Amino acid sequence: MTLGDIAEQIVALPNASVDAILHDPPRFGIAGELYSQVFYDHLARVLKRKGKLFHYTGTPNKLTSGRDVPNEVAKHLRLAGFITELNGDGVLAVKK
């Protein structure tokens, strides 16, 4: 077992070494790096082909700022090489 900050530790994981990922980060204001394109690119790198990822987003700031976090996340995941769909309180993504 490895303990550490995933934003730092993910760079050491081998390519295509993970079958599935459940990503439930704290809100953006606390851990913005876990919502970055660089991090999503690493998630795609470590996930096996056709591997699945569920990114919990909830709907933060929708009422106060009008931000659509689930669709923003889906866009970044598509740029990283995933096929995405909004699903429940998050985004379900499959690596191409």
Image (cartoon, rainbow, N blue to C red):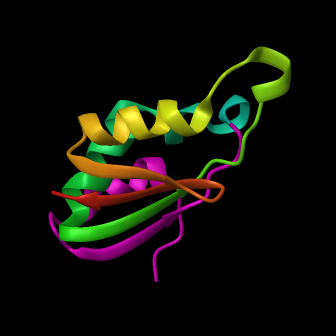
Q: Please say whether residue 65 is visible from this viewpoint.
A: yes
**Is residue 13 a member of the stretch shown in magenta?**
yes
**At which x and y percent is residue 46?**
24, 62
Q: Residue at horizontal 49%, vertical 30%?
A: 72
Q: Please say whether residue 11 is visible from this viewpoint.
A: no
Q: Residue at horizontal 27%, vertical 51%?
A: 83
The C terminus lies in which quarter of the figure?
A: bottom left
Task: State the extent of the magenta-drawn residues as a range.
Answer: 1-27
Residue farthest to the bottom? 1
Q: Residue at horizontal 71%, vertical 40%?
A: 27
Asked if 89 appears above or below 70 in the picture, the reply is below
Q: How many marks?
A: 0
The answer to which of 76 and 28 lies nearer the viewer is: 76
Q: Residue at horizontal 21%, vertical 74%?
A: 17
The answer to which of 15 and 83 lies nearer the viewer is: 83
Position of 95 compared to 84: left or right? left
Position of 38 compared to 46: left or right? right
Asked if 90 appears above or below 41 in the picture, the reply is below
Asked if 47 appears above or below 93 in the picture, the reply is below
The answer to which of 78 and 5 lies nearer the viewer is: 78
